[in-house]
Amino acid sequence: MENIYTITLYGFIVGMVGTGLGGIVSLFIKDTDRTLSFLLGLTGGFMLFIVTFHLLPESFMLGGLYVTIGGIALGILLVILIERNIGKMVNNPYMKAGLLLGISIAVHNFPEGLALGSSFLTYSDLGPVLSLAMLLHNIPEGLSMAIPLKANKMRSWNIILYTILAGIPTGLGAFIGAYLGMVSTVFIALCLSFAGGTMLYIICDEIIPGAKTLHRGRASSIGVVLGFVIGIVLYF
């Protein structure tokens, strides 16, 4: 049981420190419409890469076509339901985009935590290495969440707090993964495609349109392409 608590601690550190560092990095970015438009595009491109080459292919390999499509549909439905409620409370599109993206990142972090917790049991020598890799991988995700919040002129401490909170599901997933050992691959596949569906909808409906609204030039489009390419470089 003590080993499970240690693994869970690893999960919380990986998730919360990783996304939190992304939030901190965002505070040092120059605050102009063109810059924020470019960075929102960069966020959209990077997250599009995550969905295209990471979440959906892994979901397909683990659960098959129907599980993946079902997860995508459920993810989109969840965002639409949340969007309706957030829309009543939050009028600013950048604030809404940041919160929705934070939810999708949190959902995405849960199956990552499951994988992390299971890896400590099955491949104990690789657990710490995988933890470091996930921590570094979470930094750009935290930055992606923070940029729309920064565009909304949110206070610095609140940006850091929200990005840290998005990492909590990694710790919860690590606990469940360590406690149950090898979790059902179908369940993990559903979580991955669910997160992919939420991100895909938010990118198309909030992030890219919001970036173009901030600045009508080519900055956001260049950002989308560059963000996609950066994803390829980081993950391959």
Image: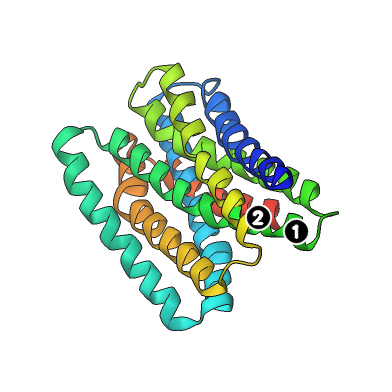
| Identity of the residue furthest to the bottom in this view | 65
* Of the pair 126 and 180, the residue shown nearer to us: 180
Q: Is residue 95 above or below residue 119?
A: above
Amino acid identity at mark 2: Ala
Q: Is residue 218 visible?
A: no
Q: Is residue 66 above or below residue 143?
A: below
> What residue sits 57% from the left and 76% below the top?
62
Q: Mark 2 falls on what kind of element?
A: helix
Residue density around tag 2, few if under 14, some if 14–19, many if 20 or more, within 10 Å: many
Q: Is residue 45 visible?
A: yes
Q: Is residue 70 above or below residue 51?
A: below
Residue density around tag 1, few if under 14, some if 14–19, many if 20 or more, within 10 Å: many
Callout 2–callout 1 Cβ contact below 8 Å? yes
> What residue sits 54% from the left and 46% below the top?
172
Say which quarter of the image contains residue 89.
top left
Q: Quadrant of the C terminus?
A: bottom right
Report x, y in % for residue 53: 58, 65
Q: Mark 1 falls on what kind of element?
A: helix
Q: Which mark is residue 121?
A: 1
The Cα–Cα distance between marks 2 and 1, rounded to whole angstroms, is: 7 Å
Please name the residue that numbered disc 2 is placed on: 178
> What residue sits 50% from the left and 21% below the top?
30
| Identity of the residue furthest to the right in this view | 125
Residue 183 placement, left or right of 82: right
Amino acid identity at mark 1: Leu
Report x, y in % for residue 133: 73, 47
